[in-house]
Amino acid sequence: MRSVLEAAKATSLHPVDVGQRTEAAILAELVKRGYRVLFPFGVNQRYDLAIDTGERFLRVQCKTGRLKNGCIRFRTASTRVNTLRAFTRDYRGDADLFLVYCPETERVYALDVDEAAASQAVLRVDPTANSQARGIRWAADHELPA
């Protein structure tokens, strides 16, 4: 049985599979911490899930962050391509919050959509080489609250 399970465990790098693993990790953390989570019907929504705060619904776009050079980076826009050109669109007005799962740190980070740059956001994990602290968005300050 173990060899069958290990064979089934092959990790796909296809973007859809990566996204589904990210959404599953984020959902698990939200449920573990007692958040009320809602899902939109259908797959073509501009947000992946919603959090019921008791007063309002927060529309959440789930993102995969990648750790490189001491920073977690993630895209803050979607891209769709047709035969003529590529269309890039940010999430302002369509989602309220980015929840970012970083496989390398195994943590979830939260960032308001309106605080993020239009194409990419960076959360710093390691100190800068020159000890700069001003203007740095620290990952630790954005970890998902308990």
Image (spheres, helix red, strand yellow):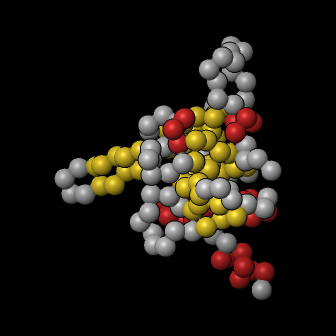
Query: In which image quadrant can residue 38 be found?
Result: bottom right
Lateral position of residue 23 relative to residue 87, left or right: right
Q: Position of residue 135 (x, y in %)?
A: 62, 20
Residue at position x 74%, y 64% in the image: 31
Residue at position x 30%, y 49% in the image: 87
Q: How many marks?
A: 0
Q: Is 3 placed above or below 109 here?
A: below
Q: Position of residue 39 (x, y in %)?
A: 57, 68
Q: Is 135 placed above or below 78 here?
A: above
Q: Is 54 placed above or below 2 here?
A: above
Q: Which residue occupies the foreground of this view, 26 or 39?
A: 39
Question: Which residue lies most toward the left here?
Answer: 84
Query: In which image quadrant can residue 4 be found?
Result: bottom right
Residue 66 in sight here: no
Q: Position of residue 136 (x, y in %)?
A: 64, 24
Q: Which residue occupies the foreground of this view, 76 or 11?
A: 76
Q: Is 81 placed above or below 138 here?
A: below
Lateral position of residue 91 relative to residue 145, left or right: left
Residue 8 in sight here: yes
On-image quarter of the N terminus: bottom right
Question: Which residue lies most toward the bottom here?
Answer: 1
Lateral position of residue 25 relative to residue 16, left or right: right
Q: Position of residue 126 (x, y in %)?
A: 72, 29
Residue at position x 62%, y 49% in the image: 100
